[in-house]
Image (cartoon, helix red, strand yellow):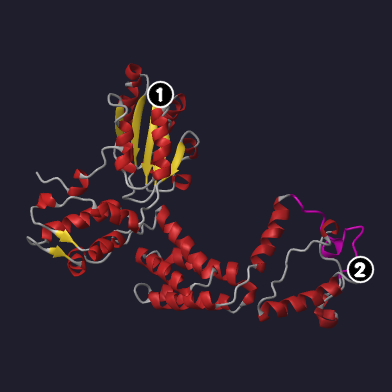
Amino acid sequence: MYEPLANRLRPRTFDDVVGQTRVLSLIKKMIAEDKVVSMILYGPTGTGKTTIAMLVAEHFPLNNYKFNASTDSKATLKDIVETTKLYGSVLLVIDEIHRMNRDIQDYLLPYVESGKVIMLGLTTENPYIACNPAIRSRVSIFRLERLSSAEIRTYLEKIDLSAYDKNLTVSPEAYDYLATASNGEIRTAVNMLEMIAIQADRDQRADLAFAIQVVGKPSVSVDKNGDDYYDILSAFHKSVRGSDVDAALHYLARLIVAEDLESLLRRISAIVYEDIGLANPAMGPKVAAACDIARHLGWPEAVNALGAITIELCISPKSNAAHLAVNAALEDVRAGKTPKIPSHLINNPTYDDKKKYHYAHEYPGHVAPQQYLPTELKDVVYYKPQLHTKMEAAFAEQHEANLKVIRGKRKD
């Protein structure tokens, strides 16, 4: 039976693992001190979660078990827990831990808490979102990072291909392509190299053209339900905020591949009012129109509307003054700063101290000289105009003029 190259090359020691230096150093220290604690390893596929779990399990040769939260039953878990009576404690590797149902969690938690079960959970999902808080509070959580192209290339170049008996050589350009096309997943990179070795002729030099012919298009890992997807959304948002058109288009393309139109449109709609705001108020309706058109067209035609509005968002002047202002007001309210509303603003004729309300449209400039804020907050300032754009500078000028009337005279 043929054993895949990736399986043959699976690391046998921690030193053989590529990348993840910080997490590995912590785990190796725990093992050296013989104090392994329950933990969750999470990160994209191909980053070494299963490999690290297997290496940890080797230090528990008689009492390590595997459990798949998607397919295994509570009865299976009970059988595993029963062995703690024999061993004192067991190591339990739980794959897809984010799928563990509440009943199984409730059964397992006391054993994890007492240390009878040392739990090693594996997941591609962010456990701070996908896992039950009761589980999270009893474990250490380690994120595994996607490998860099340089790390993958260095590893690929060390692989001995002599077993294929073809006198095969791989060009530097082909190695570069594999390291990039694998999208940070070392297992994918090894599988690509294996396919090249299988497809190559004897004494062949596998160049870039041959690598592209065999591998095809690069691997694009975008799980729209996964943590990686939200990282890309964040990178897209920050690139637009930073006015980098090319970076924004790159991350937009990765989001388009995920084909989750509604999440993308929600993010674009959030950007326009968080980061463009008062510097260019016309962008709000433009974004709404672009989103409507994208929904109407659907894939693949929607990409043109998305591309155009992304470019315009990047190029547009930016202001987060409105974002800061409303959040400053929310912070006060959430802190309990909700004093009595001035009586003249309330439609309640039974108020003993009710003052006359001045109807703003009866005054010059349609601004009335009266107090609107509660007395305890009468001098608070939430909105602080940002003057680097003509539009908001004009708003600031009008705002200042209004304040002089509203707060300057106060003829209540």
Q: Secondary structure at mark 2?
A: loop
- Name the residue located 15 percent from the left edge and 52 percent from the top edge: 161
- Give the label, 1 or 2, closer to the camera: 1
Residue 127: mark in rendering? none
Between the residue at mark 1 and the residue at mark 2, the CA separation in whole angstroms equals 72 Å
Residue at the disc numbered 2:
412
Point 44% across, 44% down: residue:
127
Under circle 1, the secondary element is loop
Label 1, residues with CA under 10 Å away: few <14, some 14-19, many ≥20: some
Most foreground residue, 192 or 257: 192
Q: Residues within 10 Å of mark 2 (few under 14, many from 20)?
A: few
In x, y percent, where is residue 346? 82, 62
Q: Say which residue appears at 39% left-offset and 34% top-offset.
A: 28
Amino acid at the residue labelled 2:
Asp
Region of the chain picked out in magenta, as a range: 336-357
- 295 left or right of 155 in image: right
Residue 322 showing in the rendered view: yes
Image height of 371 relative to 194, above or below: below
Q: What predominant SS class does the magenta segment belong to?
A: loop
Front position in the image: 76 or 220: 220
**395 versus 351 height, above or below:** below
Q: Which residue in the protein does label 1 denote?
A: 116
Name, please, the residue furthest toward the top. Answer: 86
154 relative to 42, above or below: below
Which is nearer the N-term, disc 1 or disc 2? 1
